[in-house]
Amino acid sequence: MLNHKSRILRFIVWLEVQMDRTILVIAHEETETMQVFVVYFERDIEDDRLRNLHVKNCEYKYYFLTH
């Protein structure tokens, strides 16, 4: 899980330097990918609680990146 988490964090850093103003990221239901996004942008979630974090099917979230 930690290797996957580091890959997603690098992806978020890459997204932050893109010139696009709107980016759509799609992931499968309850994947570790969305868990990492939630932790990164919503903060205050410890790694040990990460596995119990669930994102519903068809759920969407808005996050804002600063350039």
Image (cartoon, rainbow, N blue to C red):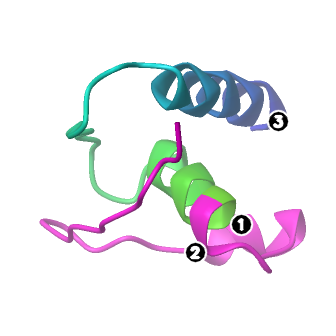
Q: Position of residue 20 (x, y in %)?
A: 26, 26
Residue at point 66%, 57% (across, down): 40
Count the marks: how many?
A: 3
Helix, strand or loop at label 3? It is helix
- Residue picked out by circle 2: 53
Q: Does residue 59 appear left or right of residue 19 in this picture?
A: left
Name the residue at 55% across, 65% down.
38
Q: Could you give the CA–CA distance between mark 1 and mark 3, rounded to whole angstroms?
A: 11 Å
Q: In the image, what residue type sits under mark 2?
A: Leu
Q: Nearer the viewer, residue 57 or 26?
A: 26
Q: Which residue is mark 3?
A: 2
Of the residues shown, which amino acid type is indicated by label 3? Leu
For label 1, the residue is 50
SS at badge 2: loop
Q: Does the magenta segment cover residue 65?
A: yes
Left or right of 12 in this view: 29: left
Around disc 1, counting alpha carbons within 10 Å, would you say few (fewer than 14), some (14 to 19), or many (20 or more)?
A: some
Residue 53's image quarter?
bottom right
Q: Magenta part of the protein: which range?
A: 41-67
At mark 1, the secondary structure is: helix
